[in-house]
């Protein structure tokens, strides 16, 4: 018993000599748990509250086919482009020649006449423009002393001639007398030594 007390006393003295506190400090602050030391966790958003991504808008198909290319007849094209006004002098000359030479002809015959004038302008054998071809000396009987007769500009014949001139210039319809450079009425027989291309309405076409 004496030895045990003695050993315990020596141990107490050793701790005191080492400066170790004899007991833990007492504090009134509550102990912090490991959970309280972690940063707050953001609240999660319920899946039902998330707005669905917008669906891509449907792109409507655009019809790039022009109305001209969908026309099923020359008459339909003429109705689209019939007008009493011409956009420029060359179209005016082409429409006037079509009017005076073929206003009583079917539309295909009028287009063939307009095409002759354009073919001449491109051939290198005549003037290089529709007006030059029309006013070239001795080519068209309706041109007298370098001028044309008055045109009934409010008539349906003139509206058709303007449309035919536009269609011919823009190659919107295939002319029935391709490559023709000359034509005459069926009632005459000039005995031309040329290649006959076609007969349309009351005209015969040659190249």
Image (cartoon, rainbow, N blue to C red):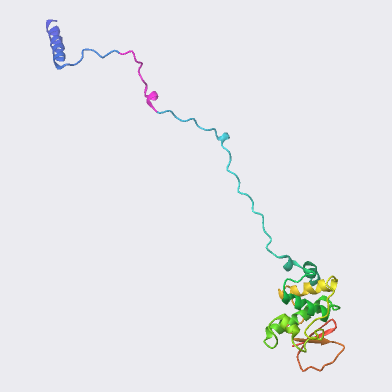
Say which quadrant the C terminus sits in. Answer: bottom right
Name the one closer to the observer, 66 or 101.
101
Q: Nearer the viewer, residue 116 or 46?
A: 116
The residue depicted at 33 percent of the width and 13 percent of the height is 28
* Relative image position of residue 139 (x, y in whole percent): 77, 87
Residue ID at (71%, 84%): 120
Farthest top residue? Answer: 1
**x, y percentage for residue 46?**
54, 32
Whether residue 147 is visible, yes or no, is: yes
Which quadrant of the view contains residue 10?
A: top left
Single out the residue that lies furthest toward the right. Answer: 187
Can the viewer see residue 205 in this picture? no
Image vertical order of residue 107 relative to residue 30, above or below: below
Is residue 153 or residue 62 the one in the foreground? 153
Tell me what residue is drawn at x 74 percent, y 82 percent: 117
Query: Magenta stretch: dominant SS?
Result: loop
Figure label count:
0
Q: What residue span does the magenta drawing correspond to?
A: 27-38
Residue 49, placed above or below residue 156? above
Q: Residue at x 21, y 14 (%)?
A: 21
Of residue 36 and residue 99, the one placed in the foreground of this image is 99
Image quadrant in which the N terminus is located: top left
Determine the image quadrant of residue 153.
bottom right
Q: Position of residue 14 (x, y in %)?
A: 13, 14
Dividing the picture into quarters, in which one does residue 116 lie? bottom right
On whether residue 102 falls in the magenta region, the answer is no
Q: Position of residue 54 (x, y in %)?
A: 60, 44
């Amino acid at each position: 018993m004496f030895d045990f007390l003695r050993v315990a006393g020596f141990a107490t003295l050793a701790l005191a000599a080492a400066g170790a506190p004899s007991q833990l400090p007492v504090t009134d602050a509550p102990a912090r748990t490991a959970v309280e030391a972690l940063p707050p966790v953001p609240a999660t958003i319920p899946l039902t509250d998330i707005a669905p991504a917008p669906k891509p808008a449907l792109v409507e198909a655009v019809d790039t086919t022009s109305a001209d290319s969908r026309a099923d007849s020359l008459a339909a094209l003429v109705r689209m482009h019939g007008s009493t006004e011409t956009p420029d002098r060359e179209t005016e000359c082409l429409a006037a020649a079509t009017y005076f030479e073929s206003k009583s002809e079917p539309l295909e015959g009028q287009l063939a006449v307009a095409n002759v004038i354009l073919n001449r302008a491109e051939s290198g054998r005549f003037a290089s423009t529709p007006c030059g071809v029309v006013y070239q000396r001795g080519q068209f009987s309706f041109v007298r002393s370098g001028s044309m007769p008055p045109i009934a500009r409010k008539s349906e014949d003139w509206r058709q001639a303007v449309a035919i001139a536009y269609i011919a210039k823009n190659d919107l319809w295939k002319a029935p007398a391709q490559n023709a450079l000359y034509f005459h009425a069926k009632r005459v027989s000039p005995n031309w030594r040329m290649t006959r291309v076609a007969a349309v309405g009351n005209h015969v076409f040659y190249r």
